[in-house]
Amino acid sequence: MIVRFGYVAMSVIVKNASPSKTMTATSFKKIEDREAAIRKLERIAEENLQNTLRLLYHNRAHDISLYRFSSKLIPLIGHEMLKGWDPFPFLNEKFKEVGDYVKLHKMRVSFHPDHFTVLSTPRAEVLKNSILDLQKHLSMLEAMGLDERAKYNIHIGGSYANKPKSIERFIKNFKGLEENVKRRITLENDDKTFTAKETLETCEQLSVPMVLDIHHHWVNNDGEEAVELWPRVKNTWSEQDIPPKIHVSSPKSEKDPRGHSDYVDPQFLLGFLRPIANKTGQIDVMIEAKKKDDALFQLMRDLKEEDGVKVINQSTIEI
DNA sequence: ACCTGTCAAGTCTGG
DNA sequence: CCAGACTTGACAGGT
């Protein structure tokens, strides 16, 4: 089984390369000239895209072909006071540059809209904004010229004291989405509410690929092993042109088991990878550790010492 | 250069 | 019904 590793949004090694610079709503309001304020927002977004490019160069130099974009590339987009603002004309060229580089080096990229995107919500206003947020992520991927292999990953959402009803609502709202928005969604089990089993059942029902987070599963499960669920999880990817993806992180501490620690425990990951290795051709593993790319490099050093692990390049192993 | 409180968005808990 | 926690990188305002 070929295993590729990737990391999320920012590097702790490349300095001054944040792809998530922003402006607060308060400081936007303080600028008298609205046009000037908008130009400032657009310059920040352009800088975020330029830093994204720099990170991709860094990834390329280290054979890293799996990467998640920051979802904060365009500051304040979607905010009430920026109604009517279309940042894309100004940013299209830069988005295309990012996308061209991704395609040239055959990278796998994604987004993870944050927890304000909630398709299980009973509130019409929240649903409306969630759909707008998904459309925004679609627009960014389209501006990059990336096809449906570039996805955005979300959670089911809140339970509102009634999980079955909430899943029902999620399904109904999901089905109401436009086809092109829908086709890029992946669903991930979360660490508090919807377990891997519940998420998997939803994915199967909707034909959506599932991103299994093995740390979330460790803190929030229905008593079954992640390895037992794997054949079905893997199967949700069978219609996709990309390998299944999982997320890994390690508990911050006993006191805070849901928190993410600086680095990833190689034994915890191997405990999942080894049993599935024979029945899985390829898998992509997104590392969600505080030390970002440094955690990836540390994991590679740790794995190199393990029996049955063959290092293919700086971010890929065979097991 | 460094420190601290604050920040668009949602949900859940507890008062 | 409302305040605060959750979580996180970065701003904003201060020294």
Image: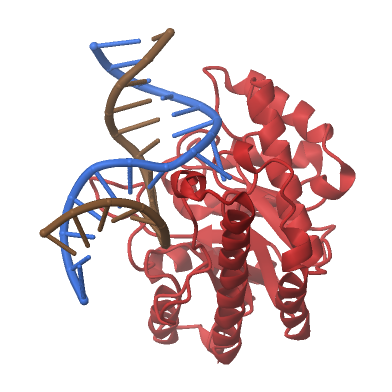
Chain colours: A red, B blue, C brown
Q: Is residue A231 left or right of residue A104?
A: left
Q: Residue furthest front?
A: A32
Which residue, as the protein is rendered here, is positioned at the far right?
A179
Give how far across and how far down residue A215 sits, in percent. 45, 53
Front-most of residues A158 and A279: A158
On screen, residue A33 versus residue A167, left or right, reads left
Give the side of residue A217 with respect to residue A197, left or right.
left
Q: Position of residue A311 (x, y in %)?
A: 53, 89
Quarter the C terminus of chain A occupies = bottom right
Find residue A267 and report its image quarter.
bottom left
Task: Looking at the picture, tell me which residue is in the foreground, A148 or A33.
Answer: A33
Residue A225 visible in the current orientation: no
- Picture quadrant of residue A151: bottom right
Q: In this picture, is A31 found above or below A17?
A: above
Pinpoint residue A75: horizontal percent, then vertical percent: 57, 55
Corner quadrant of residue B3: bottom left
Above or below A91: residue C2: above
